[in-house]
Image: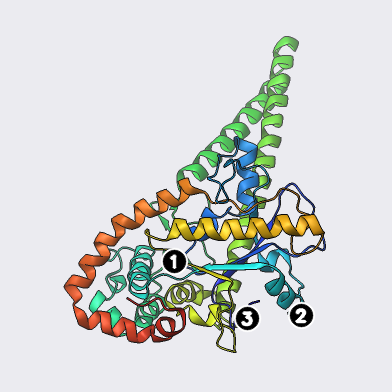
Amino acid sequence: MPELPQVAPCDVWVSRAPAVAQQGQQPQVLLVVPHTEHWLLEVLGGPCAERLANSRKRRPRKRGGGDGGDGGDGGGLCFEPLAAAYPEAKPAELEQMWQSGTVISAAPNVLIRAARAYIRIGSGWKSPAAEPKCAPLPFRAFAQDPVALALQGGLFRCSKLDEDGHGEEEGGGGGGRGGGKGGRDAEAEVEAEAQGKERRRRGRALQRAGKGKGEDKGKERQKQTDQTKGKEHDKEEEQDKEQESEREGGEAAKARSAGAGAGAGAAAAPAFVPAVHDLALLEPLSPCLTALSGLLAVDYLVRPDPEHVLEDLREVAQLVNSAAKAGAATGAGAGAGAGAARLLVDELALAKHLRGERERWKEYREMYSQCGEACVQQLSAFYAQDVEVLGVGR
């Protein structure tokens, strides 16, 4: 049984069976998801909130059965953030979860991870044409000191997300995740409201002028229609505000989680959230995948390279589902009451991820060929602990 990790710079998600009440039950699966490996969450079931939203719009797409099942989505596990699912969990309870569930993670080759983080961080910054100071450091300089890239972004406020996690407004539109409505949408709302007020003003003026009763009735109906539209408009505005508040709350929670993971602490100023996110992409993985004893804090470490990833995912799904089936038969173990809930591998999502990775690997190879052996040695030294403990060297 694995021990709790030293620190938590990685996100931790716990499994849920959507169709089954799970009060008082331990999660079957815990996913330790590094910030550069979000695909692992998507391939093994995805967030429960996202699945619920999709189920309301359309039938869930079928997933490839990692345990040789029929590939259907019914009864498949989904995941929630550990902090949201168990907000008041005590250390002893967390340790019990870690020991009773199956803990899964993925650790990529350190050189691939470094190149991926470099590209992802730079793609989230403002355009160098608009902000020359936000031109990312050359890859050669990044290899000498990867943290310098995150510091550059924090110092010059290069992130496209502002201090509250909203997208910058370029050309009147909300540019980032969690941002407000675009300028044209806001202008359309203002114009519609102004037109409604004008129609109501004219209706009142016609009534005072003593128009015929039939016309008055027509204007009254128009007035009622305008009032109804006005109420609907107000309701829509309230809904928009609620949705915006929820998005801001979600981004704030993510920011707090990222801040805690990077050791920033609760006193970290919101202005540093984008830089903390960048640092989380660069941090070595070994502290969140190993215990203080030096042993691995996970049961299964998936190899994310194309040659092994599908094989590893199918194997771990089979192990989890076999254990759940045995637990259901004896009435013991994590997820014993979860019925037919299974860990399924979405092979379509995995194939999509791998196609994108193969394209990016061409870019990675070009970056390292231009940089030379010095970059390889410098990044291997930076991630020396990952190479030694996790065995994910070049």
**Image quadrant assignment for residue 9:** bottom right
Q: Are marks 1 and 3 in contact (CB under 8 Å)?
A: no
Q: Are marks 1 and 2 in contact (CB under 8 Å)?
A: no
Could you tell me which quadrant the C terminus lies in?
Answer: bottom left
Q: Secondary structure at mark 2?
A: helix
Amino acid carrying label 1: it is Arg
Residue depicted at x 17% and y 72%: 370
Amino acid carrying label 2: it is Ala
Check the image and report above or below for 34 versus 373: above
Left or right: residue 304 versus residue 181 is left
Where does the image place residue 124, in percent across and percent down from the top left? 39, 64
**Numbered label attached to residue 303:** 1
Mark 3 or mark 2, earlier in chain: 2
Where does the image place residue 317, in percent across and percent down from the top left? 58, 57
Q: Secondary structure at mark 1?
A: loop
Left or right: residue 279 versus residue 89 is left
The residue carrying mark 3 is: 266
Quick one: 5 or 264, which is closer to the camera? 5
Tell me the mark number nearer the camera, choosing from 3 and 2.
2
Residue depicted at x 48% and y 75%: 280
Quick one: 129 or 342, which is closer to the camera? 342
Task: Give the spatial CA distance, label 3 vs label 2.
Answer: 23 Å
**Image quadrant assignment for residue 196:** top right
The residue carrying mark 2 is: 92
Check the image and report above or below for 108 versus 202: below
